[in-house]
Image: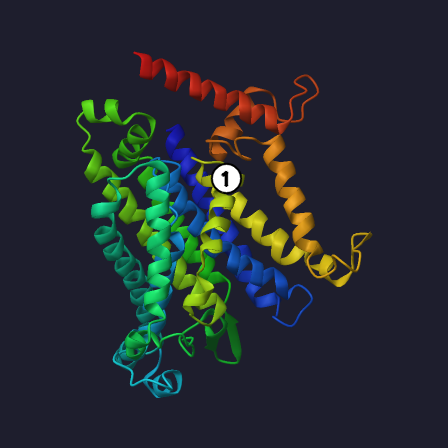
Amino acid sequence: MKKTKQNYTALIAVLIFMSVIFVLDQLIKPTDSLGMLLTVLQKGSVYALAAVSMNLLNGFTGLFSLGHAGFMLIGAYTYAIFTIPSVERDNVYQYFDAAIRFSFPETFSQALGPFGTVLGVAVAVILAGLIATLFAYLIGLPVLKLKSDYLAIATLGFAEIIRAIFQWEKLGPITNGSNLLKSFVRTSTMQLTIGSVTLSFSTFVPVLIAVICITIIVLLVNSTYGRAFKAVRDDEVAAEAMGINLAHTKQLSFCISSFFAGIAGAMMAMVLSIAQASNFKVSMTYEILLMVVLGGIGSITGSVIGALLFIFASEWWLRGLDSGTFLGINAPNVFRNGFRLVVFSVIIMIVVLFFSKGIMGDRELPDLIRSWKKNGGPFRKKNRENLHNVLDSAQDESEDHSGRRAKS
C-alpha cells in the first residue's frame, strides 16, 4: 500500500513537471530574455539521460567505460540520416551521392498525416538506440573481458575510432564525410497548429523523451536485473557463486547503457539541429562523467541533478562572466574570455570537497525524504544537521550493511 502511494505521488509529480514545461514552451519565445531557459532545459534533458545511462554502467555495474561519446555519435547520425526529407537530401550531401534516401517521418506522414510524422520521429529515435546497441554488442564481446583502467582505455579508443570512421570520405554517401548533417526533423520545428493557435513542443519533446527513458532505467535498476548489476559491482566472485552469469550480465548492462546513450545522441541532434562527428569528442565523455561524479556514483537522482547543475551553470548562470561583469564580479581583461570556466572550475572543486561522494552519494530522492522525516527535517533546530551530514550518515549505514553482507 505504501509503495503504491509512493508510485502515485511520483506519477503526479512527473505530470505536474511536464505541465510546467508545456506552459513554458508556450509562454517563452526563443527571442525573449528567458529564452535561454528553454535552451538549457533542452540540453539539460539530453545530458541528464546521458549521465543516467553512464551511471547505469559505471555506478550500478562497476564497469569503467569511457566510450559514451561514441555511442551518442552513432545515435545522432542514425537519427539524422533517417529523418532528412528527400527534397533536402541532395543539398545536404553536396559532395556525395546519398546512399540512403529513406525518411521515416516523410514516409509515415504520407499515410498518417501529422501523426505519421510523430511516429516517424519516434521510430528514428528508437532505431538510433538500437544501432548503438548493435555496436555495443560487437565491441563488448572482446572489450568486456578487460577490467578497470584497461576497459576505460579500450572504450575510449573505440569512441575515437568511431569518430574517425564517420568522417572517412569513403563513407561519405552515408555519413556525409566530415561535413555536417542538417535539415532533418529538429525540436525547433516541432509545432502543432490548431486553427489560429500554434503550440510549440521544442522543449516538451526532449524533456518527455528523457523522462520516459530515465523512468525505464529506474524500473530496471529496481528489478532483478538491477540487483544482478549491483551484485557484480559489489563482488564478482560472490555474484558468480550465487549463479549470476558475469559475462552475460556485463554485456547486458553495456548494451542497455549504450541504447540510452544512442537515444541521448539522437536528442542531441534534435536540439542542436546538426549532426557532426567533430562535436562528439573525448571531452564530451569527460563532461558526462563529471556530471555523474558530482551527482553521486550509483544515484540516478544524483546524475539528473549533476547534469542540470552543470548545464545551467556553464551555459547560463555564469555566462555573464565572459562579458566582463556578473553578480558584482569584475573579470580582469586577461581572464575575460574564459573567466566563466575559471569560476565554474572553482565551484566544482568546492562541491567535490564538501560532497566527497557526490551531492546524493548512492541515494535517491525517496531515501532522502525518508531521512528528513526520520530526523525531523533537514533544517530543524533540534537536529542541527545539514544536508551533507544527512546524506553521509545514511550512506555510511548502507556501506556498513553491504560490508556485513559480504562478510557473511
Front residue of this view, candidates 15 and 41: 41
Q: Which quadrant, please, contains the N terminus?
A: top left
Residue appearing at x 25%, y 52% in the figure: 139
Task: Name the residue tied to disc 1.
Answer: 293
User: Image point 29% across, 79% down: which residue?
Assistant: 173
Whether residue 212 sits left or right of residue 321 in the image: it is left
Q: Residue at x 29, y 58 (%)?
A: 132
Q: Quadrant of residue 181?
A: bottom left
Residue positioned 42% across, 40% down in the render: 8
Q: Is residue 201 visible?
A: no
Relative image position of residue 30 (x, y in whole percent) = 61, 70
Place residue 205 in its image quadrant: bottom left
User: Tag 1's secondary structure?
Assistant: helix
Q: How many marks?
A: 1
The quarter of the image holding the C terminus is top left
Q: Position of residue 188 (x, y in %)?
A: 50, 72
User: In x, y percent, where is residue 2?
Assistant: 40, 28
